[in-house]
Image (cartoon, rainbow, N blue to C red):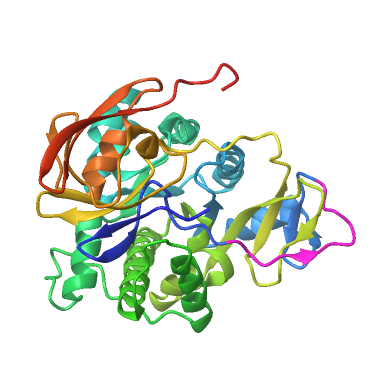
Amino acid sequence: MPLPFAFRRGLPMLACLAGAFALSAVPAQAATCPAPGQWLEPGGQQLAPDALFAELAERDVVLLGERHDNADHHRWQLHTLAGLHSLRPDMVIALEMLPREAQPVLDAWVAGDLGEQAFVDESHWHTAWGFDPALYFPILHFARLHRVPLKAVNVTPELRGRLVEEGWEAVPEAERLGITAPVEPLAAYRERLAEVYAQHPSRGDEEELERFIQAQLVWDRAMAFGLAEVAKKAALVVGLIGQGHLQYEHGVPHQLMDLGVDSQATLLPWSVSGDECQTPQEGLARAVFALDDSGSEAVSPKQLGVYVSSHEAGVEIHSILEGSVAEQAGLEAGDIILRAAGEPLSRPTDLSGLVRQQRPGTLLPLDIRRNDDEREVLARFPARSHDE
């Protein structure tokens, strides 16, 4: 299935519809299937949890990967956070999910000054992130219960776009929040990013691929810079980040090394469900946790099912997913969406933010321009099924 991307004036950007890109590790066939609940060193050797956690407690940065829509991944993260907190109560939890501008809201949440809905509203969660906040609330409540500081380490799509389009030197240091330019990526990382980009149906030429790679590097560097800032204060910082940014130390770990953070470790969940049991390749991470997530259904964000870019009048549809809400509503490639629910649109995130707020079974009015004709289209989001 193609990965949803958002395009900003021709610049390919990973959309919050998909979260951070998820790249699959190349597995090795296992002679014996690891049992769920085991910690493994990539290559198959089982690790003793007490020894592993004692080692991790001495690190400056521990990175916990995730597939954003997998509830079991977030449960694993919570339990791992609890184990680390028992050894390092001075720890800080860093979040990919929110840009730095949301930091006052995270501080207010930890202090107990906000309820769940107020947190979602004031952090602009649905605009900044495309996944159900209920997946993250157990971790957020853990942080508040134990007064563990939460750190927002991402940047807004606007800043990410400026850094790619204008270049790092052209954006004043204060406007880029002091974040330094990324170190060049490893060749293997470039290859993996190119594979992801090749899956997009509206992919462009080599120049567009390079912009996509540079956008990804901004994302990696921003998160690494935020993690390094916390690590300088002698606290253990634990980052919750999409696994594609962490595998094989290619993304955020590579940028952390450039920032002088050598004492780091990456942990990943590893599925051992299914008929063909596989073990992770060497070098994938410091350790993986064997997880039977066959009963965990993915909680996907609401999607209209369109690939869009900014347009002077709104957002322009480039292609539509088969069987999507957009197709059923009669939208077509080439349509310009002017307004959604009466709100003018100027960029893809304006549309995706409104889509995420739609409740099951509701209609989203879209004012569109097709050729020279303006009309209203009603996008109907399916009702929640009884077994959800």
Residue 33 position within the rendered picture, expressed as x and y whole percent measured from the top left: 85, 53
Tally of marks: 0
Q: Which residue is drawn at 41% across and 72% down?
A: 255
Does the magenta stretch mainly form a helix, a strand or a loop? loop
Give the quarter of the image for residue 360: top left
Which stretch did the figure color magenta? 24-35
- Which of these two is toward me, 262 or 375? 375
Q: Is residue 221 left or right of 313 when viewed as pictured?
A: right
- As drawn, 23 above or below 208: above
- The image shows residue 356 at horizontal and vertical percentages of 34, 34
Which one is in front, 200 or 109? Answer: 200
Q: Does the magenta stretch include residue 156?
A: no
Judge from the rendering whether residue 131 lies leftward or rightward of residue 292; answer left or right.
left
Q: Which residue lies furthest to the top in this view?
A: 386
> Hey, which residue is sitting farthest front in the picture?
372
Q: Where residue 97 appears, x then y in whole percent? A: 37, 47
Quarter of the image for the C terminus: give it.
Answer: top right
Q: Where is residue 254 in the image (x, y as percent from the top left)?
A: 47, 74
Residue at the (37%, 72%) spot, across then down: 213
Q: In this view, does 102 lie to the left or right of 246?
A: left
| Residue 107 appears in view | no
Farthest right residue? 31
Q: Dividing the picture into quarters, in which one does residue 6 lie?
A: bottom left
Residue 83 drawn above or below residue 267: above
Instruction: Answer yes or no: is residue 153 visible.
Output: yes
Query: In the image shown, does 192 or 140 lie closer to the viewer?
Result: 192
Quarter of the image holding residue 45? bottom right
Kindly identify the residue that appears in the image at 84 percent across and 62 percent down.
30
